[in-house]
Amino acid sequence: MDDEPPARARLKGLLGEIGAGTVVGEAGHGAAALHAVSATGADVVLLDIRMPGMDGLEAARHLARLERPPAVIFTTAYDAHALAAFEANAVDYLLKPIRRERLEAALAKARSLTRAQIAELASTVSPGSARTHVSATLHGNLKLVPVDEVRFFRAEHKYVTARHPDGELVLDEALSALEKEFAGRFLRVHRNALVAVAHVRGLDRDSQGRYCVRLDAVDETVEVSRRMLSQVRKSLRSPT
C-alpha cells in the first residue's frame, strides 16, 4: 500500500521475482488499504507510512482490531531516529529504496502486530498526531467512522460508544485516552462523556434543572455534570 503508483509497481515486480505468493490487492491511501484487506483477507500487508489522509501507522492500528489481523511490514524513508523506534518495538520495516533480499527476509519473519506495539510506535514516530477514523469489528468486518462525523463519545460499562449521524460504534477504548488523543476537538462535559466542539449547537436546561448539550444531526443530548458546568460554559464561549 503506497500512494505512489511507481513504488507499488516496483514492489509488485519484486514480489513476483521472489515468488512470494499472490498479490491480492493494492491501495494508494490507508482507508483504501483497510477496505482491500477486508475484501481479500490478505495474510501480509506492506504499508507505506507516509500516505495522504490516513497514514500507514493509523491503518495498522485499525488492522490490529480484526479477528485475524494480517502480518504487517512497513515501508519507509524515515531517518535513523525513527527506525530505532521500529526496532525497539520489534516492528519490521523496509527502508526505501527496497532491496530484493531485504524484502525476502522481511516476508520470512512477517507477523501480526499488537495494538500496544503500534500505538507505542505511533506515539514515538509521530507524537501528537490523532487518528482520522475510529474503528471496531462488526460481525467480523472492520467498521470505520471518520472522527469528524462523531458527535460524542460516551462511556457505558466497559465500552465507549461513538455516536454519529448514521448510528453508533462501540469501541474497546478508554474515554480518557480518547480525550487525550482528540484534545481541543472534544470537550469533557461529564465523567462519562465527551462532545465534539464543532458540532455543539446549544446548551439547554430541562424541567428538572439539568443542563444538556445539543448537537447537530443527532436527536440525543448529552448531560453536563454540575461540577463541569462552569468550565463547559467557558469553553463553549471561547473561540475555537
Image (tube, rainbow, N blue to C red):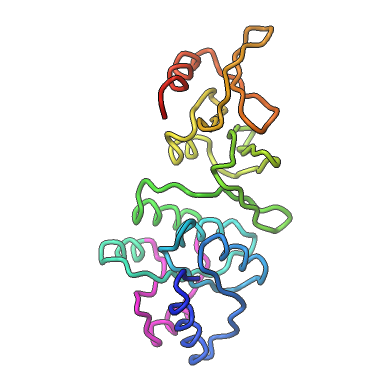
- Residue placed furthest toward the top: 208
Residue 31 is a magenta residue: no
- Give x and y (percent) for residue 205: 62, 11
Q: Is residue 211 above or below residue 181?
A: above
Segment colored magenta: 89-114
Count up the numbered dots: 0
Picture coordinates of residue 124 (x, y %)?
34, 53
Q: Can you say whether 203 is above or below 4 in the image?
A: above
Q: Quadrant where the C terminus lies?
A: top left
Q: Magenta segment: does it hold 103?
A: yes
Q: Position of residue 22 (x, y in %)?
A: 60, 84
Q: Is residue 61 left or right of residue 218?
A: left
For the point 48% across and 56% down, which residue is it?
A: 53
Residue farthest to the right, as pictured: 139
Indicate whether 164 appears above or below 84.
above
At 41% across and 22% down in the image, what residue appears? 238
